[in-house]
Image (tube, rainbow, N blue to C red):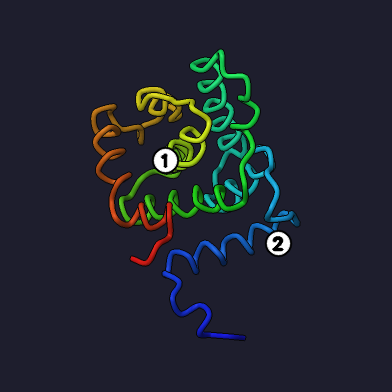
């Protein structure tokens, strides 16, 4: 094993590489393909230990429904349902980071990280968008749901922080 090959990689890039390998082993899939998000929902149940196994599916379905409703004339909405392992790994890694560092509830952290990854990598490339209010409305109801004002503040302050930027782009931090 060549230890010097990994020397210049940031800790974020090493962690996401390990997570990608774990996802590939857990699901026995190829890294270079795109997959429908429903394939990955059992990963979210496993990594976040949701009591109700339908929560990740509900969150993603609500997210996709909001995209379809808001972007009715966008022909390629099916493409927004397709994710790579790297995008899923980033969603998982950011959500875990948010729940550990900032104490976000698992459901809140998952919606927050899906919103960040989609707005950074998928919406921008396809010319579609969701407003922050629409992303906020995807958070399932519960006593952990913050006010819209605090969500808006978190989305800009935490979502553009150095740590989250490193997780999104994994450059040397």
Q: Quadrant of residue 60?
A: top right
Residue 142 is left or right of residue 46, and the answer is left
**Residue visible at 30% across and 32% down in the picture:** 146
User: Residue 70: horizontal and vertical position, in percent?
Assistant: 49, 16
Dot 2 or dot 1: first in sequence order is 2
Dot 2, crowdedness within 10 Å: few (<14), some or many (≥20)? few
Q: Which residue is mark 2?
A: 25
Q: Which residue is mark 1?
A: 116
**Residue visible at 61% across and 42% down in the picture:** 83
Q: Quadrant of residue 142?
A: top left
**Residue visible at 38% across and 24% down in the picture:** 131
Could you tell me which secondary element the residue under label 2 belongs to?
helix
Q: Which mark is residue 56?
A: none
Please tell me whether mark 2 or mark 1 is closer to you in this view.
1
Could you tell me which secondary element the residue under label 1 belongs to?
helix
Q: Which of the image's four quarters has the N terminus?
A: bottom right
Residue 146 is left or right of residue 110, and the answer is left
Q: Which of the image's four quarters has the C terminus?
A: bottom left
- Nearest the viewer among 93 and 14 is 14
- Nearest the viewer among 16 and 99 is 16
């Amino acid at each position: 094993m060549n230890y010097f090959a990994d020397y210049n990689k940031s800790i974020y890039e090493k962690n996401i590489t390990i997570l990608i390998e774990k996802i590939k082993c857990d699901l026995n899939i190829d890294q270079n393909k795109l997959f429908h998000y429903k394939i990955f929902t059992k990963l979210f149940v496993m990594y976040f230990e949701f009591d109700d196994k339908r929560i990740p599916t509900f969150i993603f379905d609500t997210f996709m429904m909001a995209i379809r409703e808001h972007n009715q004339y966008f022909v390629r909405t099916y493409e927004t349902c397709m994710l790579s392992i790297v995008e899923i790994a980033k969603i998982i890694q950011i959500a875990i980071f948010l729940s550990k560092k900032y104490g976000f509830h698992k459901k809140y952290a998952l919606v927050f990280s899906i919103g960040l990854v989609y707005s950074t990598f998928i919406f921008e490339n396809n010319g579609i968008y969701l407003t922050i209010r629409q992303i906020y409305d995807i958070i399932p109801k519960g006593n952990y749901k913050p006010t819209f004002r605090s969500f808006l503040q978190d989305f800009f302050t935490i979502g553009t922080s150095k740590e989250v930027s490193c997780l999104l782009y994994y450059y040397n931090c």
